[in-house]
Amino acid sequence: MTAAIQTHRKVILIAGACRGSGPATARQLAGEGHHVVLGARRSSKLTALVTEIRKAGGSAEWYALDVSQPAEMREFLAFAEDVHKRVDVVIHNA
């Protein structure tokens, strides 16, 4: 990872991270040096994706949520803000 990427590292939340373009987006952004926080209902798929990203040298974690529930989306955002003290980007992939 270059110093330029480290300097501009973002905390990026991806809701609906298990399907569609979510996994590819997570891999790409983590590969560019950003920290991704992945949210979806399928914790087994989230666990596998986070493990894959970490094995490749990326930074990721997951949070189980149903994106159709506004309260769960607020909890997802609050979780990331609690852990990282900021959220730079939210991608709502669902």
Image: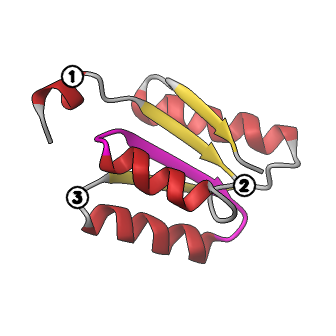
Percent coordinates x, y for residue 68 in the rendering: 88, 49
Start-end of magenta stretch: 32-42
- Sequence-earlier tag: 1 or 2: 1
Pointer 1 residue: 7
Pointer 2 residue: 65
Measure the C-alpha gap from mark 1 to mark 2: 30 Å
- Sequence-earlier tag: 2 or 3: 3
The secondary element bearing badge 1 is classed as helix
- Residue at image coords 51%, 26%: 87
Q: Looking at the image, which is closer to me, 62 or 22? A: 22
The quadrant in which the N terminus is found is top left
- Residue at image coords 29%, 54%: 58
- Sequence-earlier tag: 1 or 3: 1
Badge number at residue 57: 3
The secondary element bearing badge 2 is classed as loop
Percent coordinates x, y for residue 20 in the rendering: 69, 61
